[in-house]
Amino acid sequence: MTKHFNDMANIGETNISFGVIKGKEGLLLINSMVAWDVSNFVAELKKISDLPVKYVLNNNYDGNNTELNAYFAAKGAQIISHKALKYSDVFTQKLIDDGFTMQFGGQTITAYHSQGHSFGQINIHLKEANVLFMADSYRSDWLTVFGPKGIDGHINGLKQALAIADENTLIVSGVVLKEKLFADVSDIKRQISSSQLFKSLIQKHTKKGLSPEQIATHQDITTFFETYYPKRKYHQWFVHRVRPAVNFHAIPRFDATNKDKNALLGQYVSDNGKIFEIIKEGDDFIARSINHYMLPLKWTQEDTLLVTSSERDDKLLIKRNSDEEITHLRLSLDDNWKKKYMGAYVWTKL
């Protein structure tokens, strides 16, 4: 099923997607929809069955996938999300690992972790129905948020979908245009190709010394969006996809010493009292806070950590004492909404 609403882009009627599986004792929802539309959503469910919702399985942390989690939990449903949602403010109950499988309503339901869109993104496959719910790891209406691994992670998630799907699979994206509610493998292949092109354009123009703002207005980029996303007429938004691509795929890592890398790791307290920890995964760093927030970092200058997924110029600046020991991180944030999680000014090392 899908639910129609007018999105902020003012590009016409679009759809938030969700899934419903009917079992003998109740319903299983794939995503729980937005809180402001609860009465309409519940009415739609009653057209299917008067049985209660027994399970909610979230694709990721987005509000249109999770806002009614607590509502259905209060009525007896079990809420199931990827373990990475431990580092978010989403209400959930059961945290699952990669490759989770369950049986319900005659369906074998498998949740595959994707590197696209967000740390907790899972693609949900209904084997017998041959339906794949991808949420915002694939969007037909707009170039999606790439996620914690950049365009490469986004593309790997799309390739993973191709490994699961066949020519008859109905693919459900997070937000779609009304005239095309379902995608298929040809759409996924097209987005792989277009995303690879987008990455190559970003790298090409960064090598020429162009800033993200300059790249976003370059004819190559405007032509790209006109070709693949012709309904998106707002060029000021293009930089929101350009900047993370530059961060991930064009700005080199700083060759920090192993001593400094190890010194960076550990716990910090933000100026609003939240505890963050910084961990290392491969060449990348991740800052995370239980029940609050999780973000990827890249060490790009001696005392600069770039928030790679940021659509703006967000950084953490490393500060040291007279003995050159890392004592705190000063926040340089343009994304004001993040400040409620991350604090506005400083993290002090514990």
Image: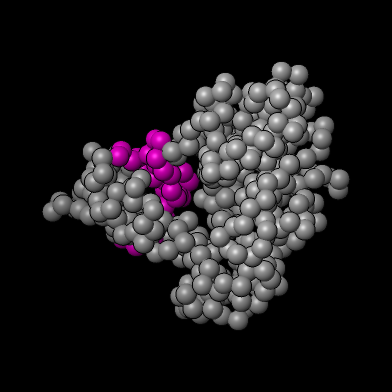
- The reply to whether residue 254 is visible in this rendering is no
Q: Is residue 189 above or below residue 263?
A: below
Front-most of 250 and 211?
Answer: 211
Q: The N terminus appears in which quarter of the rendering?
A: top right
Q: Is residue 273 above or below residue 173?
A: above
Front-most of 325 and 144?
Answer: 144
Q: How many marks?
A: 0
Which residue is the extreme one toward the top? 25
Residue drawn at the location 36% of the way across and 57% of the way down: 336
Residue drawn at the location 63% of the way across and 40% of the way down: 40
Quarter assignment of residue 274: top left
Quarter assignment of residue 6: bottom right
The percent coordinates of residue 38 (x first, y second) are 58, 38
The percent coordinates of residue 164 (x first, y second) are 76, 41
Q: Which residues are magenta?
A: 274-302
The percent coordinates of residue 322 (x first, y second) are 13, 54
Residue drawn at the location 76% of the way across and 52% of the way down: 181
- The reply to whether residue 212 is visible in this rendering is yes
**Left or right of residue 159, residue 242 in this image:** left
The percent coordinates of residue 108 (x first, y second) are 76, 28
Front-most of 269 and 291?
Answer: 291
Main secondary structure along the magenta-highlighted residues: strand
Residue drawn at the location 20% of the way across and 53% of the way down: 320
**Left or right of residue 204, residue 319 in this image:** left
Coloration of the structure image: one colour
Q: The C terminus appears in which quarter of the rendering?
A: top left
User: Is 33 one of the magenta-colored residues?
Assistant: no
